[in-house]
Image: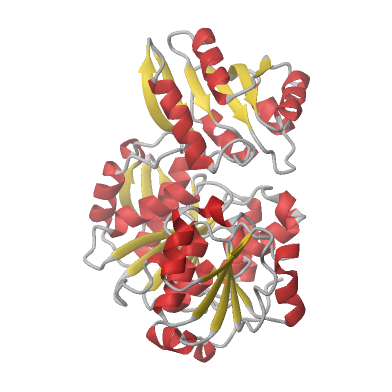
Amino acid sequence: MITERNEVDMVTRGRAYLDAVAGRRVTVVGLARSGVAAARLLRAAGAQVTGTDLKPLEALGRVATELEALGVRLLTGRETRGAFDGADLVVVSPGVPLDGDQLGPARARGVPIIGELELGWRALEAETIAITGTNGKTTTTALTGALLAEQPRPVLVAGNIGTPLAAHALRFPADGLVVCEASSFQLETTETFQPRVAVVLNITPDHLDRHGSLGAYVDAKARIFANQTPADCAVLNADDEATAALAGRTRAHVVWFTRRRQLARAVFVDDGWIAAKLNGHVEEICPVSEIFLRGAHNVENVLAATACALWVGLAPEAIRRAIGRFRGVAHRIEFVRDRRGVQYYNDSKGTNVASTLRALESFAERIVLIAGGRGKGQDFAPLAAAARGRVGHAFLIGEDAPKLAAAFKEASVPATRCPSLEAAVEAARRLAMPGDVVLFSPACASFDMFDNFEHRGDVFKKLVERLE
């Protein structure tokens, strides 16, 4: 269960927090995108910063040079002894497990440990809308940002979507609105994080290799509510049992979204329209037919984003205008090209089984599927069962290709293991016929073969563009 929230008057934010950090000794663990942003913010605030990473110094490249120029002491590779000596605070990147050996010395000394999301939020003063869930976070975050761009206040879209909150915390005005995608890894390192609106889209098993159990994963997601008050808002999916159950774990005002029925205090689908009933009467927002994005799951994403926009006072006509213009985000069922009547889609952000299931459901056409990578301890049987009758053939890559192949064989879905993504794209090209869809939706993490899902998706797109 979530621990009792800190009292609001104990939370210091904005300039006052940055002033308090000045002169303090802070160790930043993990020097990827979020760790670098945290180190820069802390140095700008006058903190004494040590940055540590398991990669050797030469692997950090230009980042190491930039941080050293800012006065960050770097301890990398095997030379990390003493990284936490005298530290007043540790800021950890999302990819670093809290119970891992890397943080052992900090835990042993009882040094406070927070994440970059918490640090960025403390440095800001603007109201925040935070969006989490197993799937759909990035699309819903980007869409909510697009909706809020229709009003005059400055809008920052950041967080797990690719722009660290800490990277903009010093410059973003207090009267702005922050739309923040929050992952379970980020939320488990929050302490005082209090979004004005907290959204949970859905919950299915994911990252079990990191969290250890579904219950621990749900607990991490539920931390998004930990510091909310009845003056805040929680937006929850009434159609998802695990998400709906979280209503009992927040003190915020709950607003539901649902595709299946009309509810009070909800945004829903009514006779082909996105509609809302928040003030006792039904208000039509936008025809479902004006949503450009494929799939029923994207209708849910629109419902959730609409709930956020209505809560902050955006007019229905402005919401409709922005929904009609929104074209989605890179790497999420992203159309790449049509080649000789075959459509190629990049869904590299499909990093778990539930996400790829939604991608499959988005197409009526016969699918040639490319999947595989690092499976994160998932059961692939549901994916193989859903592929039966939808997927003409699956080409499987990466570390867990054997497990995927076994599941597809059990479901009688034709599948072939390929040594590389390039080989899979070429095999799909030879097999696909006009009217088919070639869908790259891995259902797995990317780290066995690529830097991240963006790198993986970019490689896929380049391979497709090169097809003669």
Residue pictured at 55% horizontal, 46% vertical: 135
Residue 419, above or below 449: above
Colour scheme in use: secondary structure
Residue 149, above or below 341: below
Query: What is the x, y in percent for residue 347?
Result: 49, 34
Residue pictured at 51% horizontal, 25% vertical: 439
Nearest the viewer among 68 and 332 is: 68
Q: Quadrant of the C terminus?
A: top left
Nearest the viewer among 306 and 442 is: 442
Residue pictured at 66% horizontal, 76% vertical: 84
Q: Is residue 136 left or right of residue 189?
A: left
Query: What is the x, y in percent for residue 425?
Result: 52, 19
Q: Quadrant of the N terminus?
A: bottom right
Q: Is residue 385 left or right of residue 269?
A: right
Q: Residue furthest left?
A: 152
Q: Is residue 158 visible?
A: yes
Number of numbered discs: 0
**Quarter of the figure with residue 98:** bottom right
Nearest the viewer among 237 and 37 is: 37
Q: Is residue 313 left or right of residue 3?
A: left
Q: Residue furthest bottom?
A: 9
Residue pictured at 52% horizontal, 57% vertical: 32
Query: What is the x, y in percent for residue 356?
Result: 58, 34
Residue 275, above or below 88: above
Query: What is the x, y in percent for residue 137?
Result: 49, 51
Nearest the viewer among 430 and 411 is: 430
Q: Is residue 263 visible?
A: no
Residue 317, above or below 180: above
